[in-house]
Amino acid sequence: MTAQTTTSKNPWLVLMVFSLGLFMTLLDLTIVNIAIPSIVDDLKAPLDGILWMLNAYSLVYAVLLITSARLGDMFGPRALFVAGVGTFTVASFMSGLAQDPTQLIFARAAQGLGAALIAPQGLPMITSLFAPEKRGGVFAIFGILAGLAVVLGPTLGGLIVNNWGWRWIFYVNIPVGLALIAAAFTLVPDLRPGKSHRLDIPGVVLASAGLLLIVFGLIEGQRFEWGTVTAFITIPEIIAAGVILLVAFMLYERRVQDSEPLLPFAVFRNRNFTLMVFVLMAMGFAMLGVFLPITIYLQSVLGFDALTAGLTIAPMPLAMMVASGIVASQVQKIGPKPFLFAGLTLFTIALAYIAWTVSADGGRWALLPGFILMGIGMAGVWTPVYDLATRDLKPELAGTASGVLNTMSELGTVVASATIGAVLQNQLATSLTAEAVTYSKQLPTPFQQPFVDGFANAAKQGLEVGANQNGASLPLPPGLPQSVVDQLAQLGHAVFTHAFVDAMRPSMALPIAVVIVAALLSLAVKAPARVGVPRPAEQTALA
């Protein structure tokens, strides 16, 4: 990169601006998670609709990250960062105004576009402004801010939802976004590339279409009973078409490696980078795989309000923030590999503990050891993973590497949301029927079969898992005694809570398996080269 404007800016202030941009997107994501049951209740959204609300953001974000990194190479990181913050701010306003699930899905997709423009711009700046031996501490700052976002997300989100409603979780982004735009123009230099670049439009189209078909098939599979969607088109055919398009994308990218492809294979020649890509995918998969069912569990099964649910989760990111500082101070002395393996191992143990502990009549304190251990494990992952991925990369690959790393991490989230959502829906549909059969025996004979049928048909109608949902809508004939109505409501709630816990455990087994594989692969990491003197390319002004 060459500077087109003054380069006398303070690099730590530049880092602050990019970090706060990332912080805003992370905060919004965690706030939305804690508000899911309230959104379900207000907009009458089924579980697959909520999955689309999450995936509209994640899918757009994942597909456009590498493209955004290339645009940053073309027009400069600052320009793309400002465009991203502006887009994200406007989309947040539109999300707050949404009146039905469809409007919210489209607004969240626009937020994903804004976040995609923001995310890849920080890493090229870091590799230009900070010498390799300083980057561990810089990445620790990102880890601490990520932890802070996760802390504030559930707690601030719970406070906002309880007092002002879920719409204000989006409106809070507006003043933050405006302040960030002003700070970017004031504090961040306009660094531009020394050569022109092109966009790989066919690559974008193939990757986008393939991901869209796969995610659609996984999310909507339960609704269509994994069969026909319309005419002769079936869910398996849609998923297979998506896989074929992604294979075509990889074959096409192989052909255009000499002409600036969307996915440059050169970055994968570095063993550590390739391994860290999988680790980030695994962590993205695991994080969503845990917090999607946990958020619903705390509010819809245990009956916590949004603020209490947020405070229940808060020890996890607090532990991560405290441990991140310790890890960052030791990574450069001991090396990142031991911390990475230990972090992934602790994270796996924490997931298994939570999956084993959850119960329909559990309490908030039962999960506390798991959340604390999870936070410590995450601290052992985030700082080493970026250090290992970027330390030995050439500076000219920084922009591409940033896009690839962020894309693969978010792809893990997209795949997790679709896959785990599909498992959760399928298992919940099965468990609801089984639990309904068991609990129906406590009802008078005329109400037993309608009670079971109501839950058996819940999957076809769209499973709702809001804070005030009991898992099915049971048509009640007029004139029922109040005692019978109360009994139906009580048994309906019992059926839902026990069925959801039964469905939770197999859905959480998936992220546990994925993180175990990541931990084993981390053993193949090479010790990064120790660099005592910054390379000339990294001694740009700003240092």
Image: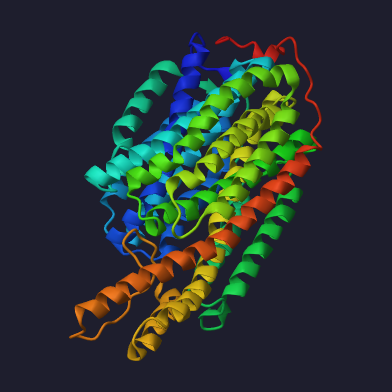
Nearest the viewer among 260 and 239 is 239
* Coloring applied to the structure: rainbow
Residue 293 horizontal side relative to residue 403, left or right: left
Nearest the viewer among 350 and 171 is 350
Q: Residue at x 37, y 27 (%)?
A: 181
Nearest the viewer among 372 and 454 is 372
Outermost residue toward the left in this view: 479
Residue 253 horizontal side relative to residue 25, left or right: right
Query: Horizontal and vertical percent for residue 29?
Result: 43, 43
Quadrant of the image containing the N terminus = top right
Quadrant of the image containing the C terminus = top right
403 up-or-down from 44: above or below: above
Confirm whether residue 312 shows in the render.
yes
Q: Quadrant of residue 46?
A: bottom left
Q: Quadrant of residue 472?
A: bottom left
Confirm whether residue 262 shows in the render.
no
Q: Quadrant of residue 541?
A: top right
